[in-house]
Amino acid sequence: MGLIVVLVVGLAAGIFSGIVGTGSSIMLVPVLASIYGPKAAVPIMAVAAVMANFSRILAWWREVDWRAFAAYAVPGAPAAFLGARTLLILPSHTVDVAIGIFLLSMIPTRHWLAKHMLRLNLWHMALAGAFIGFLTGIVVSTGPISVPVFVSYGLVKGAFLATEAAGSLAIYISKIVTFRAAGALPWDYLAKGLVTGSSIMVGTFIAKPFLLKLSPDAFRHIMDGLMLVSGLTMLWNAAFAS
């Protein structure tokens, strides 16, 4: 029964994240924690996240902005390694608060950048990759943070999904390698992550026709809504955990 629940939620998470580019971890981690335990949820979700991002790359392969990917991933992958090593000794409460505030502040910031026609450049992407990569090594997911970064670079719809997924894939692979080397990713966790990730992959391809029908303005409004909900959720979780 637990496996069925994971597959159903994973499919729904894949459809949602296939449209907006993130959200699968936010939907799945509470389910994984309740079924397999909180300590198992993080490495299992890391494996599933690799598969989820890989599926988005496959679905939008021709849309990848490889320059933005390289600028983001090259510093992001080693930063994720350092973050994952820090995970064992650093509580995530303070990080959750910082991420929540950051997400909420990015809503007016993104509109200000668009109004003044300011875009992030490749150097900004490199700095963001290092920062987000380190945080991704510590917490379960920082997908909502990478959303405003790639959107502010000027990517929308398929180009945004594919390029953000490629950058996140490099970071999550680094995180998995670190977990595996530290003995925090045994084979049964790996198998559960593969099963979870498979359901997300199916949902991603189901979502592709819906994304094609979205206008750029509608897509940006969805991004604002996602950042608002995600930011408030992280602040709520941090307050509840305290």
Image (cartoon, grey):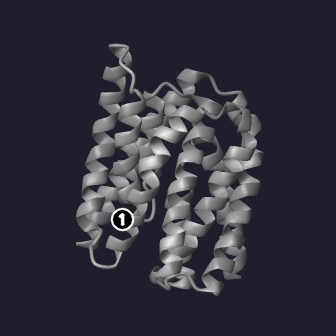
- Amino acid bearing label 1: Gly
Q: Classify residue 108 as left or right of residue 32.
A: left
On screen, residue 200 above or below 218:
below
Res 213 quadrant in image: top right
Question: Is there any visible trace of residue 150 in the rendered image?
Answer: yes
Tally of numbered tags: 1
- Depth check, front residue: 63 or 100: 63
Name which quarter of the figure residue 94 lies in: bottom left
Q: Residue furthest top?
A: 116
Q: Tell whether 146 sits left or right of 124.
A: right
Q: Which residue is mark 1?
A: 83
The picture places residue 132, in percent across and down from the top left corner, at: 38, 51
Residue 36 image point, x, y percent: 56, 84
Identity of the residue drawn at 47% across and 35% down? 150
Q: Position of residue 207 (x, y in %)?
A: 72, 43
Identify the image quadrant of the C terminus: bottom left
At 72% from the left and 53% from the top, the residue drawn is: 203
Quarter of the picture holding the N terminus: bottom right
The picture places residue 24, in percent across and down from the top left corner, at: 57, 57
Residue located at (67% from left, 46% from top)? 56
Residue 136 visible within the image: no
Residue density around tag 1, few if under 14, some if 14–19, many if 20 or more, within 10 Å: many
**Relative vertical location of residue 148 with respect to residue 88 in this rendering, above or below:** above
